[in-house]
Amino acid sequence: MPEGTICNKRPVASREDLDALLADSNGKKYYAEMEELDVDAEKLWATIQKTMKSRTKTWLDICAHCGLCADSCFLYSVNGRDPKQVPSYKIQSTLGEIVKKKGNVTNEFMRMCMDTAWSKCTCCNRCGSFCPYGIDMGVMFGYLRGLLHSQGFVPWELKIGSGMHRLFRAQMDVTVEEFVDTCEWMVDEALEEWPCLEIPVDKEDADIVYMINAREAKHYPEDIVEAAILFHVAGENWTMPSEGWEMTSLSMFAGDWEACKMQVDTVYGAMERLRPKRMVATECGHAYRATVIEGPYWAGRPDGKPPVECLHYVEWVAEALETGKLKIDPTKKIKEPVTLQDSCNYVRNAGLRDCGRIIMKHIAEDFREMAPNKEHNYCCGGGGGFNGIGRYRKQRNVALKMKREQILATGAKFVIAPCHNCWDAIRDLEEEFEIGIRWSFLKPLLIKMLVVPEHLLPQE
Amino acid sequence: MFTKILFATSGSPCCDAAARVAFDLAARYNAKLFVHHVLGVPSRGFSQVVVDVRTGEKVELDEDYIMWVKDELKNTYDRQLKSGVDCEIETSVGIPHREVLRKARQEDVDLIVMGASTTGCEADADAYQRHFAGSTLQRVAKASKAPVLVVNRPVASFWGGFTNIVFGADFSKASEHAFKFALNTAKELNAKLHVFHAIDIGSTHSLISQKQLDDQMIEARDRMRRKYLIQAGDFKNITADIWEGIPYVEIVKYAREKQADLIVMAHHSKDVSDEDSAFGHTLEQVLLRATCPVASVNRADKI
């Protein structure tokens, strides 16, 4: 069978395509069709020749198989130091082989590559920090995912996820109308406690445009109003775009580069339309990576930067606390031992390691660092799309063990996780291992601790 | 008075008492009833897994499962459904309180009916307990525009309508909305309204002097008149009482004495996420102990 009806090389192009995928319970039909999917070797090799740049070629060539990357990989550690989990082996035995064989690989081999690319690497890029040559398997696995996607070998959930981006410019089916209505709804709910609170939509020339993860609009819109409250208390002149508010990119996890560009163009379009001074991104790691780190290249921006200066939420909070825009009531600081999860995507991959510590200094009395931490911290265990793929749930649950050990070693029962993906992984970690911990985003914590100016409080 | 009622149910036996009240109310006031069940929290990307309320097992969320749950709900409420109530059964996926609030907003309902707690029923208590059970009710009650009618156990004094309404006054701002709801309900349904305040002497550790108690009584009487009774106008079917004691005990006793079929109170706890302060001690205790439905009113929108 050259192509299946739902598992094929064609990206999702219509609501019908998406519904057909969604109707397939747990991707059963999808994966069955995948077993019959033809590999278009010619196209694969042509794609490699066109897209594989000198960096990847060099990395594949110069890797000495020294194995120094092994211990850097948490998946290697938690899987009993299985040699098949050594990063250099993982990439050489997949991408390396495809290149060596000039794309002449079998369906079975491609499925092995898919399993490796999505269940043995979270693209956390930690290995790149420890390789003597600076070879980054995470980056190469990102590239491999793109090749696999172009041939239709992509996990079912991520085909849906990138399809959502193609159809809705969001990882979930939230329309512009639903989004604007959600903003109004959230203000409605909060007005009694926060008189004069606003979520200004499509305000031009504001100081800040705030952008989010679609899950907030879809499942926990409290997060949007919490951001609004904090901007309100800080006295910010801010706005949200009715279109282009979604910063995440499941298409990045899927390797669907075309959808990545479509998504980030919408986000940059909103920045250009509203002309804010700065963009503040919600507490999400991959959203920041997609929009701020990788996005400019997808969009072909000549300066390699987004249209306006972009801050992750931890940067804005750290700045607001340091400048006194937000003040913390010292009596309300977190008294119990608390630890902080460093998101790979904005800490290791964007250098924002100090912001979290500045925030902790203001809000926690007994902050306990994980070991290792900052840019050397491990992935939460569910990055790179791992959290959302049912096919690899078992492997993902094993991957959580490293974070479990790190958290237990701190003695803290409370984990601050300013990243949606880390938050999910830590929630699942508690569900899986029951180590008796709690977890939180920053926003609800900050609201509880704020010193709120009298004039912003409701008049009784 | 009630034209659209949302009955938010887990479908488990702990919602049976609430179901009875929801269907009875819809029948009596000819209201449209939305029976809404939230299947669970999505946590696996698009291969969503939910914990089945009855079996406690993790189930793949697909069309077949949703149909099965809807059929189960139809079977569970079979007797009530046959009574001819205009009823829609619907399921959704998401965080329960948010989806209940979303549905209430979409349909612009006048009343939400819920059970108070799934304690003892929840096979998934350790899975997503933060989002289920009492916390769902607390979050719905805090944010809902419509009054939330809570039925925690089989009610002894509810016969399908409201004839004796007890309003538990605490003089807060939210309690003004609650009073308006109680008054309007009493007026429209031709019920008796009993305004009641309990002076809290149970939680003070030192003995309160009679002089202090008398002073507090006088002050409470004055506030009750100024804040609430004055609004009754020519509505005469109203009584007012002030007792002293532990407020929740006194409210429950008072409601029993008045053969109340509805207690109305305000929910004005600032913070629902903190388990210790959730709901406020008095309202929570009344919910758990009252033998009639308890309406939590927090906002003025649907009064």
Image (cartoon, grey):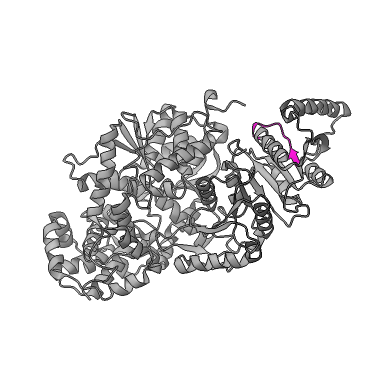
Who is closer to the viewer here, B267 or A333? Answer: B267
The N terminus of chain A lies in quadrant: bottom left
Determine which quarter of the picture holds residue B204. top right
The C terminus of chain A lies in quadrant: top right
| Viewer can see residue A371 | no
Where residue B58 appears, as percent x and y from the top left, is 51, 67
Residue segment shown in magenta: B166-174
Rendered residue at 67%/55% (across/down): B18
Determine which quarter of the picture holds residue B154. bottom right
Who is closer to the viewer here, A191 or B245? Answer: A191
* B171 is within the stretch colored magenta: yes
Where residue B227 appears, as percent x and y from the top left, is 72, 27
| Viewer can see residue A44 | yes
Rendered residue at 57%/62% (across/down): B124
Determine which quarter of the picture holds residue A384. bottom left
Q: Total of numbered circles in the picture?
A: 0
Who is closer to the viewer here, A378 or A188? Answer: A188
Rendered residue at 29%/55% (across/down): A251
Where residue B39 appears, as percent x and y from the top left, is 52, 60
Residue furthest top as drawn: A455
* A287 is within the stretch colored magenta: no
Q: Is residue A285 above or below residue B60?
A: above
Q: Is residue B112 left or right of residue A210?
A: right
Q: Is residue A172 above or below residue B225?
A: below
Q: Is residue A307 left or right of residue A370?
A: left
Q: Is residue A50 above or below residue A326?
A: below
Where residue A11 appears, as percent x and y from the top left, is 25, 60
